[in-house]
Image (tube, grey):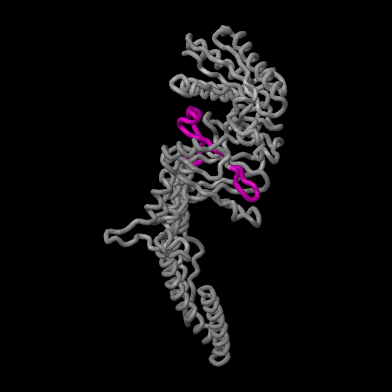
Amino acid sequence: MTGLLILLCILLIGVVVVQLGRLVELASDIRGEEAAQLAANDFNGRFGVFFMVAFLIGCIGCTVYYRTSTLGYGPHTAASEHGVWLDGAFHTTLIVTGIVFFLTQIALFWFAFKYRGRANRVAFFQPHDTKLEIIWTAIPALMMFYLVADGLTIWNKAMADIPETSVIGVDYMEIEATGKQFAWDLRYPGPDGVLGAKNFRKISGVNPLGQDWEDIENLDDQHVSEIVLPVGKQVRVRITAQDVLHNFYLPHFRVKMDAVPGIPTYFVFTPTTTTEEYRARLGSLDKEGNPLYPEWHTPFDETEPDGPKRFEAFNYELACAELCGKAHFSMRREVKIVSQGEYDEWIAAQTSYYLTSIRGSDSDPHKDKLLDFEINNRKTEFNDNINKALSSDTDKIIRLKYVNFETGSATLTPLSRFELDNVVSAMNNYANLTLEVGGHTDSTGDAGKNLSLSDARANSVASYLSSKGVNLDRIPARGYGIDRPIDTNDTPEGRQNNRRTELRILTQ
């Protein structure tokens, strides 16, 4: 409705201007050309002054009206360290250019009125005034020099990369954002704090970023659906694109950098305001308890008047500031700034993309070997299990879930040695420890053959431990076949659980 009224007002003004033009033509015919010209000069001069006043009042009115919606003013001061510098530079530029704007507009329309054509008035021709030219040249030059010098200083500070002396994971953290039609792929480093290498030739359906799985630093990297950052931590964002030009835009942090296919870019910033702190700023009250920013106290969803208010539902966001296609709008992602403790809790819940999507598949170059962190994790898990069994009065069983055999045989798989080496270490640490090695199978096939197979597998484990220096008297082996299931034999998962090798503590 408001747009329609504005359109009607514009049409009405156009009709008025056309009618005034016709009146001037009629007046020219009646009073003569010279008299009509003088009348037109008076009208245009006075109308120009009126327009100037209305125009400048409108500029001031719009500034006041939108003062709480403009970035850098009201509640929207920058939420990053460098953003404060940029806001200061923009504010200074606005003041200087604003003064010049008002003075030049006033001079333009006032002179048009004061020196309008009148009867018996003759223009004075002044071809040259050195002093005036020096003043009009020097003042703008000095102001431009100040603005450019100040802006260049701030630009160099805001766009600086991480110093070479900074330690990743300690002084700063690095994340990656890859733009594509129409989403952002976000990657975080794992516990090592380092993002692994990429190669666009390796991009595939299961490897959307083209990560090089031969690079160990890639194996703990995490793909996430939102940006979560700790407040006060310097962040370096790697920015890339896979198809067309995109733009990594965090308006509240004054972060904006093009994502260009084939040309990696970056931006470094330090968030200074958590999401909750920004919400509290938007919902601020004055001394009388009234909202400082009433527009933020309206319902977030007009269909739910009793639901959360706008300031309560506020979130920082990542947007694409390039028109990258019809679904450009869908590239919006949520950004959360939290305390260090909240961030540590969130990042601990994220999983390695390699471990969840690549490990053990045909795309995994390491599928036939264990990685160092897996070996360490398995060792920690085994130590926890044996300590629990040693301290228990009833549960004396330790399941060797990483000990496996070739199908239908008692031959240990190559990776089983890592679990058995943990058993050797435990036997060396506990001199009085005696363990029964028990072999078990599922109910598939002949029971007698299963019993023989389980016995052979138990003895195969005992033989390996003996080869590592463990006395066979401390590790008696026995096969139980199908007699002691721990799960149903009616499902593949249950049968898998029943096919197992266990250690039972006899003495400790």
Range shown magenta: 157-185
Residue 268 appears at what percent x and percent y?
Answer: 50, 39
Q: Is residue 176 magenta?
A: yes
Above-or-below relation of 270 to 362: below
Residue at 65%, 39% (x, y): give it: 209
Q: Residue furthest left?
A: 288
All told, the count of numbered labels is: 0
Above-or-below relation of 429 to 52: above
| Nearest the eye: 325 or 498 | 498
Above-or-below relation of 301 to 196: below
Q: Is residue 479 left or right of residue 395?
A: right
| Nearest the eye: 489 or 356 | 489
Q: Is residue 243 left or right of residue 46?
A: right
Quarter holding residue 481: top right
Q: Residue furthest bottom?
A: 30
Above-or-below relation of 354 to 292: above
Residue 471 appears at what percent x and percent y?
Answer: 56, 7
Mark yes or no: residue 321 visible. Answer: yes
Residue 432 appears at what percent x and percent y?
Answer: 47, 9
Residue at 71%, 36% (x, y): give it: 201
| Nearest the eye: 323 or 379 | 379
Residue 245 appears at what percent x and percent y?
Answer: 64, 48
| Nearest the eye: 305 or 184 | 305
Mark yes or no: residue 103 visible. Answer: no
Q: Is residue 60 magenta?
A: no
